Amino acid sequence: MIMVRGFAGESALVDDDLGLALAPALTPTGLVPVPSFFHGFATRPQVLARGLVTLADITATRYFRPAPTNVRDPVLTAQGDRLRAECFSACNGVYARLDLLGDGFDAGEIGYGTTNVDITLATRQALTQVARDQLLHLDVGFEGLKVSSTDQTSHERPVQMPARWVPALGNAAAMHAGLVARVHLDATAARSFVAGLPSATGRSKSGWVTPTRTGAQISPRPSADAVHIEGLHRLSALKRLLTAIGGIWFHGPADGSPGAALVTVELPTARLVLGLTPETYRGYSGEGALLPALAGATVTEDADLVSVVLAFEPVIDVPRLAGSTGLTERRVADALAVLAASGRVGWDAHDQAWFHRELPADADRVDKDNPRLVAARKLVAEGAVEPWTGEPDVWAIRSGDTTYRVRLDPADDQTAMCTCTWYLRHGGGRGVCKHALAVQLTTQNQAEV
């Protein structure tokens, strides 16, 4: 566990004000020790309250081997036209993000910045009691996330952000960026689907969400436009928002194969996004989805250049960044992957674009979270990578007493097959192995000469 930034004070719920302590904010103008993100009234108070409680439910739940946990601290980002609150389940296999859109607030202005908040049991209970027609005031600033309602008294303390959330944010972004919308349910069908989901602690069930005339059904076999959901119980938190759901989009791999999945729930003035790893036992922090991009020869310098021109955009314009930095769009995309590895950008499937969030920079973060990349660099430094005699696009990598073969895809230099145990066990499903990364580094170094 690591503290992202030091908290300026404690959270408190006194009389009618529910307050959560926030850390100093990183904004387009620098670090603001007394941040002010937003002050205003919620136009849909119950959606706001239940959305935050849903995040608290998810981050406190282990969907794989359930066990008690006390983690309830979503990351909050203000981007001028919306607020985003993000978290992971305690098992790290579910990503959740609540996008609170501008029309969900009245008589207020959304600022810029990123911080983390504390949603404890007392907060959860207070938000659960917010009525549909109750006046609800939101104040995000130095004194915390203050939600003003009635008849509540509680006192809360700051919490720490789990260290593994940083690589998890990056892997989630990379995995979600490759998904496409395949199934849509209208309000009636969506509510029926959510109502039939198993409980979070119920028996794990998986299947293909398959569109029908009246909505969708769970099928054991794939079909056109179906999306595979591994562990339907991981969607159970949606039941809290059942009456507010206006529709659901299911996103899956473009080729229709099983893999990571993304579920976007349409709400009045908001969206709730749930991302699921391909297997219930797998967590986002260990996926290695960014490794091919991180191995680029110039990505570190490119990332530094791109980070200078980011300004909390809710939708990052890659062509504009290419024009501003003088880089190609491919190099900008790889630079964004490096920033994603530090938690500084995320992916929005609805907008089909990256968005900027700001977390404290850590020059050693990429190496700490990606030991396969470190091992690949060591292999290159030791001269362990050589072309395989007589076969184009095949390389020999000496690792210990064994020589492995890596075959590159001529059409994509970031796709490779290897004879090592890692590749035989995982294929390309959990990122490339250290041997393929070593070949990638070698070919890029040769191209620069």
Image (cartoon, rainbow, N blue to C red):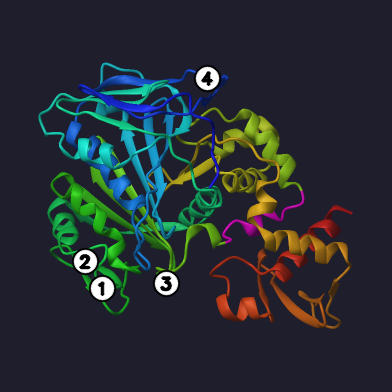
Which image quarter holds the C terminus? Answer: bottom right
Main SS of residues in magenta: loop
Q: Which mark is residue 257?
A: 3
Report, in whole angstroms, how far the alpha carbon at label 1 lies from the one at label 3: 24 Å
Report, in whole angstroms, how far the alpha carbon at label 4 lies from the one at label 2: 44 Å
Point out residue 151 in the picture as x, y percentages from the top left corner: 14, 27
Q: Quadrant of residue 306?
A: top right
Whether residue 328 sits left or right of residue 140 in the image: it is right
Residue that mark 1 sits on: 203
Mark with earlier residue (2, 1): 2
Residue that mark 4 sits on: 33
Secondary structure of the residue carrying tag 3 is loop
Q: Are marks 1 and 3 in contact (CB under 8 Å)?
A: no
User: Range of the magenta residues?
Assistant: 288-297
Residue that mark 2 sits on: 198
Point out residue 113 in the picture as x, y percentages from the top left corner: 48, 27
